[in-house]
Amino acid sequence: MTSSERPDALPPALPSMWRLCKLGYQHEPGLMATSFLLVLFAALPDALIALWLKFLGDGVVHHEPRVVLFSALGLGLSAAATWFLRTVSTRVQRKFRDKVTIALEAHVARLQATIATIAHHERPDYLDRLSVLRNQMFVLDHMYMSVFATASWILRLAVTIALLVSIHPALALLAAFALPTVFTASWRPAVERRTQERVAQPARLARHLFTLATTAQPAKEVRVTNIGPRLATDRRAAWERWYGPVASARNASAAWHTLAWAVFGAAYVGAVVFVTYVLRATAGDVLLVLAAGARLSAYVGATVGEIGFLRGVWMDGSRRLAWLEDYAASLTAAADLPVPNVLRDGIRLEHVSFAYPGTSRLVLDDVSVAIPAGAVVAIVGENGAGKSTLIKLLAKMYAPTSGAIYLDDVPLARVDADAWRARLAGAFQDFYKFELRAQHTVGVGDVPRVDDAVAVAAAVERAGATDVIDRFASGLDTQLGPTWPGGVDVSYGQWQKLALARGFMRDDPVLLILDEPTAALDAETEHALFERFASAARARRSSRITILVSHRFSTVRMADLIVVLDGAHLVEVGSHEDLLARGGQYAELYRIQAEAYR
């Protein structure tokens, strides 16, 4: 991939806009074509008004009633046709916009939800870029209308220039004097948009502080700590840090735009003087120049305005959408191998190092370890040792900075992320609270069986969450979340048990990941739960690998293999008994924790 094609760079504007047009046509071809043609047809009657005024002026001056009647009918028909076509066009466009908006929102949601990694959710530069796209997303359908309108204004300009040239070829120069306004209109939005992206972080901070001050989740702490006034002050300061540079860029570009319009205004006055005193044209010709010149000014202004919107908002939004499409595609380009149905040897990490994008600090440094098929493996280490990062690499949320991960002998990098995750199951400490019916909150762990009450009940039992469901008046049919009609409040520990049940929905995953999913439970409950699960996993005699991350050594001691991380390095690997016998870091941490529980 060349530097110009890398996902970090926004794609060129015109190809991006063309891709968005094709996307709209793909979803609504008939409505899109009809909307475009109606807009063009509506432009013609309006552009011909200057011609009817010329005939009217000549007819009056030369006392020709038929010419006067003909021109009057032309003016009336132009007005009526313009009104009728605009009315029909508006209704068709509204229908097209409604339908294409749904398609675009679904397209963006699918892209963000199915990108192979989660870097776009964690990298500040990507978050800034997606923040702007998110703001533009709900109005991106306007780009189609802007393209159609720009084409209609250009058609009006072409007809108007043709009418002026019919008086004298030199009048075509009037359009040339409008070019500075076209240039400044195209240049202004790009300057302003670059400034907005440069200061997008203060804008995100302002929205975050507003959310903190106005939503329910942080409400108790905001009131107890009395930080409401501080949040309001900091939000205002963040907004000022965003608005100051943006306002300066807008004022500077507006000054140049005003100067460009002054040039066109002087040229328009000169054209009227030229026709009247140099050419000594007829009254009809002068009237045509006055009308066409005035309309040329309006048409140029409208064209410039549409180009400004097109380049400033809609075209910029289409570039960000094209970047998102390219970024998503780039992460699956090398995925050409199938996922093994069964692991014969297991998972192997060879010299794996990783630094989060945008940083140089290695979170994992030259990690090599073999995880046997069918094993229950525990990963331990102090906070920041790289445990959760290793889990992210195994789940293909990120790709290693260097080194490789193998499924038997298949490189994980060449396996499709969706296909691999379809063979995974797991629960995480930073789980999400799905405020759905309890059955669906658990069932989304295996979407094809989300409505299978028997499968959901079995997952609930495996997770030891039966007591949670029993406390709900409607059982699995209970709506979770107090903000919904009939919804119940759920404690953090209950949410965690439901998340664990969600991770147990798939019956036969290749890899089961348990990343501190029971941190809110007491040590005795966690130990009993995982001891039961580890015994069941061994009894199945399958090739499934279970990886457990926990800070409680009473839990991890039951693992077949324990991987000890420290400061991004792999320092020890072995069974509980082996590691205790070595007297290394694991033995020291185990001793410290055991003494704390005495």
Image: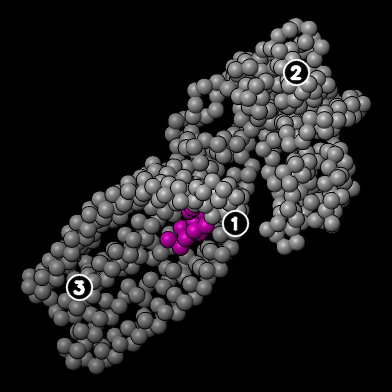
Image depth: mark 1 or mark 3 in front: 1
User: Is the stretch drawn in magenta largely helix, strand or loop?
Assistant: helix
Residue ranking furthest to the right: 539
Residue 275 within the magenta-colored segment of the rendering:
no
Residues in magenta, as a range: 134-146
Inter-mark Cα distance, 1 to 3 = 46 Å
Image quadrant for the C terminus? Answer: top right
Residue 93 drawn at (x, y percent): 51, 68
Type of amino acid under label 2: Glu
Q: In this view, does 89 lie to the left or right of 291?
A: right
The residue identified by callout 1 is 103
Q: Give whichever of discs 1 and 3 has the lower sequence position.
A: 1
Residue 327 drawn at (x, y percent): 54, 38
Q: What element carries label 2?
A: helix
Give the residue displayed 72% in from the left and 31% down from the top. 516
The residue identified by callout 3 is 289
Q: Nearer the viewer, residue 563 or 347?
A: 563
Q: Give whichever of discs 3 and 2 has the lower sequence position.
A: 3
Inter-mark Cα distance, 2 to 1 = 60 Å
Image depth: mark 3 or mark 2 in front: 2
- How many C-alpha atoms fall within 10 Å of the one at disc 1: few (<14), some, or many (≥20)? some
Residue ranking furthest to the top: 582
- Give me the disc on residue 595: 2
Residue ranking furthest to the left: 277
- How many C-alpha atoms fall within 10 Å of the one at disc 3: few (<14), some, or many (≥20)? many
Image depth: mark 2 or mark 1 in front: 2
For residue 241, say whether it is visible.
yes
